[in-house]
Image (cartoon, rainbow, N blue to C red):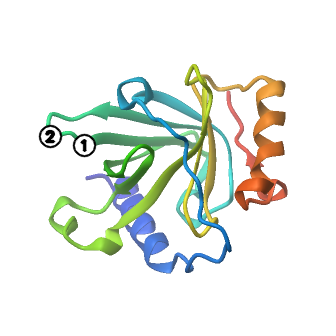
Amino acid sequence: MTSATRFLAVAALAAALAAPAAHAAAPLPTVPALDLDRYVGVWHEIARYPNRFQESCAGDVTATYTRNADGTIGVVNACRKADGETMRAQGVARMVTPPATLAVRFAPAWLAWLPLVWGDYWVIDLADDYRYAVVGEPSREYLWVLARGPRLPDADWQRIVARLPALGYDPSRLVRTPAS
């Protein structure tokens, strides 16, 4: 494991430990259906709520999901740092409650039995053709807008931003992710 991967794993664990209790009055809804076979592949981060474990990411943020033989999803998050170096973190995701409530872990496998190493990964908006997805979690402290390419059509962006307040998210907190 490289130092960058170790750093991201420790940062993800710290973020999970520090996540505040859910403060929204209404439960966070997920999409009514999620086809994991369609969801796997490469996603480009379009925007996110700022967070500690991505502070070193300057742009070109991707998440690559693959199906594992045991039914879990392999996760590889990558980003370009300001110095041009690529930083990667490997993890695993598992379905918690179908159709779209997953948990993701970047901590070592030997810690998988600890609930606190698993972070919520809820798909809360998804294009019918899987060209974009919005991922959040119940406390509404974390949010990601993902797309299949490094850019998202403005009409899609406007639709997503307009829907966020109804989900309990503040769109003004979103930071767009630079892409090459």
Q: Where is residue 19 in the image (x, y as percent from the top left)?
A: 53, 75
Q: Where is residue 70 in the image (x, y as percent from the top left)?
A: 14, 40
166 sits left or right of 138 in the view: right
Circle 2 is placed at which residue position? 70
Residue 137 appears in the picture as rendered: yes
Residue 174 appears in the picture as rendered: no
Q: Please, is residue 148 above or below residue 75 in the view?
A: above
Q: In which quarter of the image is residue 68?
A: top left
Quadrant where the C terminus lies?
top right
Q: In which quarter of the image is residue 88?
A: top left
Q: Where is residue 156 in the image (x, y as percent from the top left)?
A: 76, 28
What amino acid is found at the position of numbered circle 1 in the picture? Thr
Query: Residue at the location (62% across, 28% down)?
Result: 127
Q: Please, is residue 69 above or below residue 105 in the view?
A: above
Q: Position of residue 37 (x, y in %)?
A: 35, 25
Q: Please, is residue 129 above or below residue 16 in the view?
A: above
Query: Residue at the location (58% across, 32% down)?
Result: 44
Q: Please, is residue 80 above or below residue 48 in the view?
A: above
Query: Residue at the location (19% across, 69% down)?
Result: 113
What amino acid is found at the position of numbered circle 2 in the picture? Asp
**In whole angstroms, how far apart are the C-alphas of marks 1 and 2?**
6 Å
Circle 1 is placed at which residue position? 72
Residue closest to the eye, 54 or 120: 120
Quick one: SS at disc 2?
A: loop
Query: Residue at the location (38% across, 68% down)?
Result: 10
Quick one: SS at disc 1?
A: loop
Label 1–label 2 contact, CB within 8 A: yes
180 sits left or right of 123 in the view: right
Q: Residue 80 carries which label?
A: none
80 sits left or right of 97 in the view: right
